[in-house]
Amino acid sequence: MALDPADQHLRHVEKDVLIPKKMREKARERCSEQIQGQTNFYETLQMSDGFGRIFHRISQNFTKCCKDSGLLMVIKCRKENSALKECLTAYYTDPAFYEECKMEYLKEREEFRRTGIPAKKRLQKLPTSM
């Protein structure tokens, strides 16, 4: 039985596991990119107009705090951890972000069904000969 590459129907595991996994990966990536070097999270939050700038500099502070604090990071880095959690939660609860990840997943699945090559292998560079 061949699967139709253009089929948009999602199985239960795709809705509840694979798309949320993609959301976690993308949110983690975006938050870590967006939160490099913030000195004052709340100032940035007040001046921002969207996800792109709200959490622009949280991660660097969180990473630096964790490295500097060692085992005491649980106590010393609460503010930075809270900001990082807020960033991730904002993405997880955004319906537009879910749809973006869903469409990306459907596109990858369609490509796999058409070619039989998983996305990870497709993205690897082919060896070049001189």
Image (cartoon, rainbow, N blue to C red):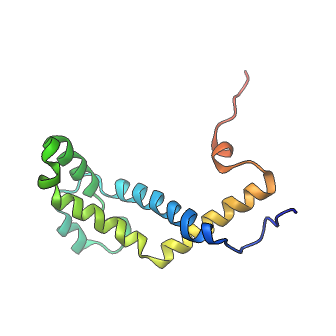
- Please determine whether, in this image, residue 38 is positioned above or below residue 100: above
Q: Residue, x 44% and y 76% (percent of image)? A: 94
- Please determine whether, in this image, residue 128 is positioned above or below residue 67: above
Quarter of image, res 11:
bottom right
Position of the N terminus, as image quadrant, is bottom right
Q: Position of residue 61 (x, y in %)?
A: 21, 52
Q: Position of residue 51 (x, y in %)?
A: 37, 69
The residue furthest bottom is 95
Q: Nearer the viewer, residue 114 or 13?
A: 13
Q: Position of residue 93 (x, y in %)?
A: 41, 75
Is residue 54 visible to us here? no
The residue furthest right is 1
Is residue 89 visible to us here? yes
Q: Residue, x 29% and y 64% (percent of image)? A: 85
Quarter of image, res 4:
bottom right
Q: Is residue 11 left or right of residue 59?
A: right
Position of the C terminus, as image quadrant, is top right
Q: Nearer the viewer, residue 128 or 76?
A: 76
Q: Position of residue 119 (x, y in %)?
A: 66, 50
Q: Residue, x 16% and y 61% (percent of image)? A: 79
